[in-house]
Amino acid sequence: MSKKIFALALAAAMTLSLLAGCGGKSSTGSSTGTSAGNGGNTATGSVYYLNFKPEQGDAWQALAKAYTEETGVPVTVVTAASGTYEQNLMSEIAKSNPPTLFQVNGPVGLANWKDYCLDLTGSDVLGQLTSDAFALKEGDATLGIAYVVESYGIIANKTLLAQAGYSVDDIQSFADLKKVAEDITARKDELGFAAFSSAGMDGSSDWRFKTHLANLPIYFEYQADGIGTTDAIKGTYLNNYKDIFDLYINNSTCDPALLSGKTGDDSRNEFLAGEAVFFQNGSWEYGNLVGEGKFSDDDLQMIPIYIGVGDEANQGLCTGTENYWCVNNSAKEEDIQATLDFMYWCVTSEKGTKAMAEDMGFVIPFKAAQDSPNLFVKQDAAYTAEGKIPVSWNFPTMPSENWKNELGNALTAYAAGTGSWDDVVSKFVDGWASEYAALNG
């Protein structure tokens, strides 16, 4: 969305009184005083958290309830459906009781919302970060705080893999993955399962490919060029992107033409039912895969997403964050204080840190963090300890949500046979340049 359209939409939605309130707010955080976010629960206001992560929606509801029971401060958690967060935030921020706590996905997301972000400089919750690298800044102001570090890759069912005659040790490169996947496909009827769960391109699932998978060619191009962002991606490794996407869709539980209607739940349920060996997803899926009637830790291993570039033997999982908390500076002063207190409690209290580690499976970048029992978190740490290099999250530098959507549409058409890979390349390269120019021109 261009800045002009964004601004117009907000202006049309907001009342005059709300705009006046925004103009009168301090954006420095000084209005909260030196006790901001001190965990003392002195706030008389309330908290409204617009949660970005559907998979942790229930856990956030439980944690909010626990906080209210302990402090008496009302906490409302609303969870946006997958792929709808920006639209929800845009609608909710214009209301008389807007979210007091919301999320941006990095510098690109911050560009749209920075006028609504309280400067957290000097707040106690900022002081709990383990590194300044997790602070999202605009000049000297800290406008966002990363609250979780996650990993993603290809989750493998080791039991099925063994039935096919392989182990995860046999997969150390794209060539290895291709060999195993295509052999499983050739024996699919005999084995009774496919190589990959469906690469669904429904809105609940397409982010796995238009964003997370697309991170790989961006990462390797940035590495080769020694950069961390760009106004014009070259597409150096898009042939490799094609190779891995082709491997997914041609060695799957379903015909590629059906992927437009396949959901994230479909893909997960196929994996849970033992219909596929591999499932691209992240550490956030752990709670959905283990437990009574599901997998045990012994069944699962997350392996890197290999695309045939670089030193694959030393490649780790894709590890990073695009999840930054922001406090709404247009909220009431007492609600801002209540929100800072809630954030501080979440990342310092025994109950809060335990819930984030165990119930949400988070690795949080705060001093009081508890160790997560999440298997995939442990495996990421083990890869790093072995000297494997994590693949950084570069997709927050993607120019816009519209760029992702256009790329997703092209991938869907390509899979269905109604579009070409040239269309995908055009959306990736030409679309990047045009979207960046529209937003930054």
Image (tube, rainbow, N blue to C red):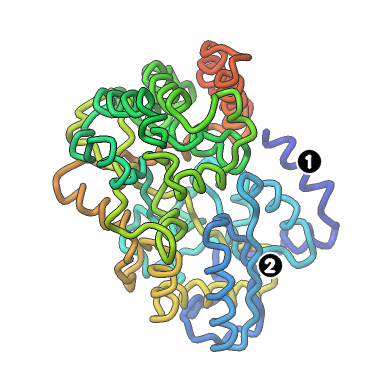
Q: Position of residue 380 (x, y in %)?
A: 27, 51
Q: Dividing the picture into quarters, in which one does residue 314 lie?
A: top left
Q: Position of residue 254 (x, y in %)?
A: 53, 30
Q: Which residue is mark 1?
A: 8
Q: Which residue is mark 2?
A: 331
Q: Residue furthest left?
A: 386
Specify few, some or many for label 2: CA neighbours under 10 Å numbering under 14, 14-19, or 20 or more: many
Q: Residue at x 40, y 28 (%)?
A: 218
Q: Dividing the picture into quarters, in which one does residue 72 lie?
A: bottom right
Q: Decide if residue 401 is on the left or right side of residue 363.
A: right
Tell me how many marks there are. Answer: 2
Residue 222 visible here? no
Q: Residue at x 62, y 39 (%)?
A: 203
Q: Which mark is residue 208?
A: none
Q: Residue furthest front?
A: 190
As shown in the figure, which amino acid type bears the numbered disc 2? Ala
Specify few, some or many for label 1: CA neighbours under 10 Å numbering under 14, 14-19, or 20 or more: few
Q: Secondary structure at mark 1?
A: helix
Position of the N terminus by quadrant: top right
Q: Residue at x 47, y 57 (%)?
A: 288
Q: Position of residue 358 (x, y in %)?
A: 39, 69
Position of the C terminus by quadrant: top right
Q: Is residue 371 above or below residue 290?
A: below
Give whichever of 382, 127 is nearer the camera. Answer: 382
Q: Dividing the picture into quarters, in which one does residue 240 lie?
A: top left
Q: Earlier in the sequence, mark 2 or mark 1?
A: 1
Q: Residue at x 42, y 72 (%)?
A: 347
Give whichever of 102, 282 is nearer the camera. Answer: 282
Residue 64 visible here? yes
As shown in the figure, which amino acid type bears the numbered disc 1? Leu
- Tell me the distance, in whole angstroms, between the alpha carbons under discs 2 and 1: 21 Å
